[in-house]
Amino acid sequence: MRQPSVLIIGAGATGMLVYIKLREAGITDLTLIEKADKVGGTWRENTYPGIACDIPAPHYCYSFEPYVWTHHLAFGGELQEYMEHVGRKYGVTDNARFGEAVTSCVYGDDGKWHVETSKGDTFAVDLVISATGILHHPKWPEIDGKDDFAGAHWHTARWRHDVDLTGKRIGVIGTGSTAHQVIPELIKGGNEVSVFQRTPQWVAPVPNIRFPEWLRRRWQRKPERMQGWKAAYRWLVQNVFINATVGKWLPNQVMNILCKGHLLRIRDRDLRSKLRPDYEVGCKRLVINTSFYGAIQKPNAHLITEGIEKIESGGIRTKDGRLHELDVLIYSTGFHNFNYMRPMNLVGRDGHRIEDSWGAGQYRTHRGVLLEHFPNFVLMLGPGTPIGNNTIIGIAERQMGYVMQLIDMWRNGETDAIEPTSKAVEEFANYISAGVKDTVWVGGCQSWYLDASGQPTIFPYDWDEFLRITEKPDPSELVASAPKDKVA
Ligand code: NAP
């Protein structure tokens, strides 16, 4: 078998997995580049109060590295500890190049990727695997007067731990999954908290249970005892939370009952109607939370729905003319979800740029990982990947199994260029768009699940279907290329 040189971009949960799996497969010419100073990705970057993963922890970890979690929904700090533990144990931490960003990847006539980094270093490699994640470029909203605010202000993904919030009047813009986690913590602190809501969210109540010490000790003694729990969580996520969104009647009804029943925790009718969405349950990414509704009813919490007119030095003026005076302003306004590996300069075969493919706001891939015109470039968790309320780690593991088979085709000399045909990309786009009509994502809301043309950027079918399409590469979907000499 010939051995490829591989460059991996990113040492978050997915990049670490890629590194570990390539090493396991005997590929040794590996370069792993990470822009930050340590592994962890999302869990390194997001440190806001209340941060937790709303996917059950026994399901949100590598299949080959079980962990004895303290809670069934792990907190951010514990997840980061886990990432660092995996990084140390599997040699990622010792071998990654930290503090360096990939700025350019250009496919050359020599069939190699020519990569440049922020440190001015260059590499020529056979294969690039981009594992940059999706939600990592904080989005600052376009609101008039944003720069006029006199007090401290920041985005939730860049939490400022140096600002003492005691006794401060705090404004939070946004009511997505992040806001639902951070707002109760701010309210709990006794501060006056004003929540600026543009669109209400459906909230599924999943309590965060602490695992009892005796159970954790049992798991520590024999980690295989966790398998049953893991399987139960997997079943729940796949059959209830995912299926509720992709056209399965029963789980959808269960989710409706859960969310609508949960809303009844709001005792004041006026407040309840402000918090009641007018779109289908699950249309926007479902929020999983049990503390927000209790917190927003406290006397020091204020839900503001009049709409933001502008930001002034002293606070936020809403469309009804009222100025909400604030000392601190927190943006919980999400991410640029369609950046993927960008802003790097990505140029494929025949000078084809990624903007040539994606410029119109349609994000096409082949089976979520391959791009037409970009041979031997793999985009982990690319458009068409099942994201929703599911484990990123499990999805990445499945994709890596598919990608390894493609790499083996290259290693065996069956192909020189792992690249999908136009027909395959077209067919995959049609297959994805055919699924959207059955989903709740077209249930009357705006969300990052759909691109500019209304096509889903996530997978609109159930988990079994995802397993089917990532089972085995179909050589007829790849651009044919003359194999180089096979090396015995
Ligand atoms: P988000 O879901 O995109 O929410 C952004 C919020 O900001 C929305 O409420 C949005 O209102 C509001 N907003 C944006 N621009 C605004 C403007 N100009 N004026 C007023 N409001 C504005 O972001 P997020 O909460 O950070 O979550 C992003 C994703 O991260 C989630 O979908 C999820 O996939 C992931 N996440 C996961 C977890 C977990 O535990 N696994 C936790 C947190 C986040 P509109 O709804 O009206 O646009």
Image: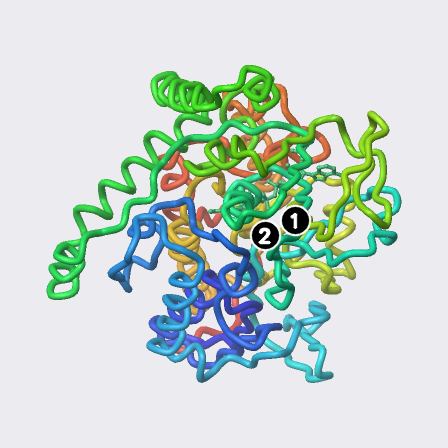
Instruction: Pinpoint residue 326: horizontal percent, then vertical percent.
Output: 74, 47
- The residue identified by callout 2 is 134
Q: Secondary structure at mark 2?
A: loop
For residue 335, the mark is 1
Q: Secondary structure at mark 1?
A: loop
Q: Quadrant of residue 343?
A: bottom right
Q: The C terminus is located in which quarter?
A: bottom left
> Which amino acid type corresponds to the residue marked 1 in the rendered image?
Phe
- The Cα–Cα distance between marks 1 and 2, rounded to whole angstroms, is 8 Å
Q: Does the rendering let one see residue 336? A: no
5 to 266, vertically: above or below: below
Q: Mark 1 vs ligand 1: CB under 8 Å?
A: yes
209 sits to left or right of 128 = left
Q: Residue at x 48, y 20 (%)?
A: 267
Instruction: Give the side of residue 210 with respect to residue 300, left or right.
Output: left
Image coordinates for residue 317, horizontal then vertical, percent:
82, 36
The N terminus lies in which quarter of the figure?
bottom left
Q: Are marks 1 and 2 in contact (CB under 8 Å)?
A: yes
x 59%, y 22%: residue: 442
Q: Mark 2 or mark 1, which is nearer the start of the sequence? A: 2
